[in-house]
């Protein structure tokens, strides 16, 4: 793994029963930590076959359960000093900050990566520098730091420290959510007695025109905006189950109106204008009208776009977090 990873450490050595690695950049340390935990997790069966496991007794039936090799990783950023170790004849690193990661690691959950606030700050600074160098484009990041809370560190390390959980960077899969939105739409339309002969949008995703697909993609991409108006944001892990998200009738109505306005803006950007009858070739649409003039059956479709948020968020694999 060290030979194949582009985030390999500058130096790596043993420290008691642990590995101690030094990196030039917080970004490299975070990415390598994520790679290493995945490598260990993916190799569970291999570790068992090599005897790298311990056994616990099941409380339900008394049987032995093999628990495979797992690791905890602690990360910290700070100045270090290069020195030469004459015993092992190797260069090493030392300094007041060296032991911080070693004190974070024991309080980390098995299979996870925890980091100090200093590390999280350096990782964010590095991300901002890369963003500016890219002319404002968002750089591809392999991880993100999620606040885990203030806690005591191991071995009586004095004080409490703000600790962050380092997790793989995740983003909404717009394409898959767009397909899910289309499937939900088709199921509702069929329940209302519509058919492909009366509604040209009721066809498999692969047969949809790019224009129809883009409309679904735009709705999927707007999910974070709707959540923001409700006072929530997406959380990759450790948050509120989306199934517990509840709306008031006024929230549904307000967001439905905004959904209709968003759809009209999206249609207008793609060259559609109002026409008394829908004409896809001429890009005329009879529903490009204010909410107050919209038929009730069409208003209900926009309300459904709001009600379906928990299903879509769960499908995307996200949790929710209250905005502070």
Image: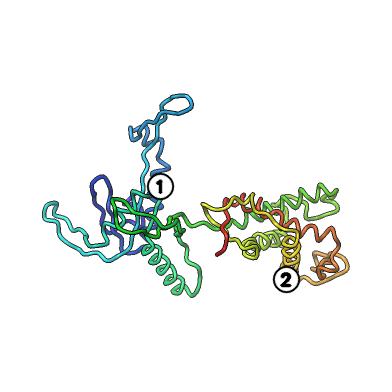
How far across and down, in percent of the image, does residue 110 sit?
A: 39, 45
Disc on the earlier residue, 2 or 1: 1
Q: Quadrant of residue 298?
A: bottom right
How far across and down, in percent of the image, does residue 269 sit?
A: 71, 72
Decide if residue 169 is on the left or right side of residue 284.
left
How far across and down, in percent of the image, does residue 129 sit?
A: 42, 72
Residue most extreme to the right: 276
Q: CA distance from mark 2 to mark 1?
A: 47 Å
Decide if residue 112 is on the left or right side of residue 296.
left
SS assignment at label 1: loop
SS assignment at label 2: helix
Q: Quadrant of residue 120?
A: bottom left
Depth check: give the residue in front, 160 or 168.
160
Q: Quadrant of the C terminus?
A: bottom right
Q: Is residue 92 above or below residue 55?
A: below
Q: Which residue is mark 2?
A: 265
């Amino acid at each position: 793994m060290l030979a194949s990873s582009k985030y390999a450490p500058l130096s790596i050595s043993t420290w008691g029963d642990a590995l101690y690695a030094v990196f030039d950049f917080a970004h490299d340390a975070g990415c390598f930590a994520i790679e290493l935990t995945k490598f260990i997790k993916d190799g569970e069966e291999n570790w068992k076959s090599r005897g790298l496991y311990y056994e616990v007794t099941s409380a339900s039936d008394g049987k032995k359960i093999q628990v495979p090799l797992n690791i905890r990783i602690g990360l910290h950023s700070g100045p270090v000093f290069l020195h030469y170790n004459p015993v092992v004849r190797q260069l090493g690193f030392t300094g007041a900050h060296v032991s911080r990661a070693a004190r974070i690691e024991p309080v980390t959950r098995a299979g996870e990566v925890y980091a100090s606030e200093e590390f999280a700050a350096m990782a964010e600074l590095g991300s901002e520098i890369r963003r500016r160098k890219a002319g404002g484009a968002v750089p591809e990041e392999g991880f993100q730091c999620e606040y885990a809370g203030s806690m005591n560190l191991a071995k009586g390390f004095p004080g409490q420290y703000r600790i962050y959980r380092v997790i793989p960077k995740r983003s909404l899969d717009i394409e898959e959510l767009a397909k899910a939105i289309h499937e939900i739409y088709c199921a509702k339309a069929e329940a209302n007695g519509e058919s492909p002969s009366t509604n040209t949008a009721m066809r498999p995703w692969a047969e949809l025109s790019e224009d129809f697909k883009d409309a679904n993609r735009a709705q999927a991409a707007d999910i974070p905006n709707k959540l923001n108006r409700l006072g929530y944001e997406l959380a990759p892990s450790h948050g509120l189950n989306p199934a517990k998200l509840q709306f008031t009738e006024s929230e549904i109505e307000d967001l439905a109106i905004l959904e209709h306005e968003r759809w009209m803006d999206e249609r207008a950007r793609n060259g559609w204008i109002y026409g008394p009858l829908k004409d896809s070739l001429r890009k005329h649409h009879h529903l490009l009208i204010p909410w107050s003039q919209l038929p009730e059956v069409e208003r209900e479709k926009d309300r459904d776009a709001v009600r379906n948020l928990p299903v879509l968020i769960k499908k995307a694999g996200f949790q929710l977090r209250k905005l502070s």
